[in-house]
Image (cartoon, rainbow, N blue to C red):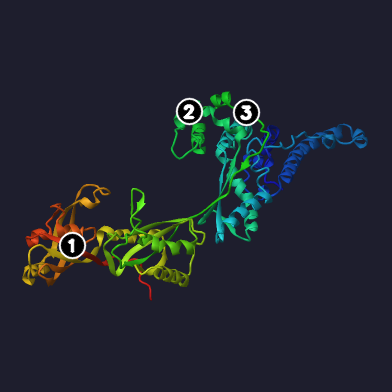
Amino acid sequence: MLPLKDKDKVIIKKMLAAGCCARCVLRFCCVSVQAPYKQPCQETLRQLQAFINNTEDKSNEATAMEENNNSHNAALSEEPAYKRAKVEVAEEADVCVLCLGVLQHLCDVTQATRIADAVKKQGYELDTLVLSISLPAQLCVREHSCWLHVKEQVRAKCGLLSKDDVIQVKEAFKWVMQDLLGKELGGVAVVTKSALEVSVGFSHSETDRDCHFLAATCPDCFKPTKNKQSVFTRMAVVKALEKIADAKFLTHSPCPPSRPSSICTPQDVHCVHVSVFVAGRYNKFCRSLPQTPWLIDGERRMESSVEELIAAPVLDAFRADGFNFSSSGREDVDVRTLGNGRPFAVELLNPHRSRLSPDHMKKVQESINASSEKIRVRDFQMVSRDAMSRMKEGEEEKTKSYRALVWTRKSIRPDDIIFMDDIKDLSLDQKTPLRVLHRRTLAVRQRVIHSMSTRFLDAHHFHLSLKTQAGTYIKEFVHGDFGRTKPNLCQLLQTDTDILELDVESVDVDWPPALPD
């Protein structure tokens, strides 16, 4: 039994006569119970007609009883008037003028099978999904036209219906399809929020021009954008319909909408999984390995990079379409990263596998470490997007420790460098280095060297260990960068100095959490 009221019969009659399908009639009757939408359209139509017949029969029965009182004998020999009364109700149109067949012909087991096959083909590991629908923008125009068609008469009779009360096509489509799709996928739950989104789209070229008049009547609502093929987006059309006066709308658009000759065309099914994040710490033992691919004028300068060595096994394990690599700072191609390593994270784009056990993650780590002697990964684990902010905090707020091999032009003795062991919290003004000026904004940055210690090697070489604020340019502190870093080691030792080797010994960011070996 449909959850309808007497006031709904006005809407039912007008909409069926206009060429609307049974499910769209339910939508305009504001039926928010899902069960009626899930039954076949023909069954819903039969029940709608029975509802109208029953209502009319009650009125006719009252008339018949009055006739019985006036002519009892005639009533005995003649069939009552209410039984003879036939209500003429329009049959359901071949193609609904409102949904263009989406709820009428494209909302059944056949479509559920088509969508499920597309999802299975892409090989996702899933237990839930969210179904999203993309409808032609002209459906908004047709909905508005039908609303104007029933608005005045309905409001005059009951004054209860508003446009916001009408159930959306997308909502009704999901109510019908979610159980069918879940069944086709072997019990997968179709929910309102899930990491996997399955998008189903429809187009209808026959009625594409239905909304074109809005561009002339509301030109400010339709602005060309780089990423959109057409200015007639659903959002733009809705905005225009909110602005246009009813009388003006009716001069450009038929009311009720014109009857189409074809149904919507289903588009390809698209699936996308939200990103998954993994993190760890890496050591780099090679002085000829960049952190990221080194390209100059489109040509590779190095055969590999830290991010590629890490990402390849990870992409394979999660079956992801792509990745974004980030880390807590970066080292130059000729700088090693030692100690407990540098924190890094990898965002995996559209992963087809989204969960790996700790044991499986350990195997991926072992695979990375076995692929090259140039790097080593530790503490490899899955993390949340929010947790990645801990790594970014370390880029400017934490400290880092380095060891540099320094050359001096003039001869030195241990006593010439030992004074630097006592220097604490030395403030530097560092103008953007010449070597990175092509990719970083010209600015003077204040940085702090918290402490230094020296170890004499010979008359022209010594080791310099430093603990600094993150973001300090160590090479420029040592050689001065033509005076762009002040003070610098040349000024402190009163001789030309240069850096021959540099190692990162620690990145003091307590993230990601350490894991047992």
Q: Nearer the viewer, mark 1 or mark 2?
A: 1
- Residue under label 2: 218
Q: First in sequence: mark 3 or mark 2?
A: 2
Q: Amino acid at mark 1?
A: Ile
Percent x, y for residue 60? 79, 35
Q: First in sequence: mark 3 or mark 1?
A: 3
Give how far apart the Cα atoms at labels 3 and 1 are.
81 Å
Residue 499, numbered label: 1
Q: Residues within 10 Å of mark 3 (few under 14, many from 20)?
A: some
Report the side of 268 relative to 8 (left or right).
Answer: left
Give how far apart the Cα atoms at labels 3 and 2 are.
20 Å
Of residue 411 and residue 84, the one placed in the foreground of this image is 411
- Residue under label 3: 255
Of residue 461 and residue 81, the one placed in the foreground of this image is 461
Give the SS element for disc 2: loop
Quadrant occupied by the C terminus: bottom left
Q: Amino acid at mark 3?
A: Cys
Give the SS element for disc 3: loop
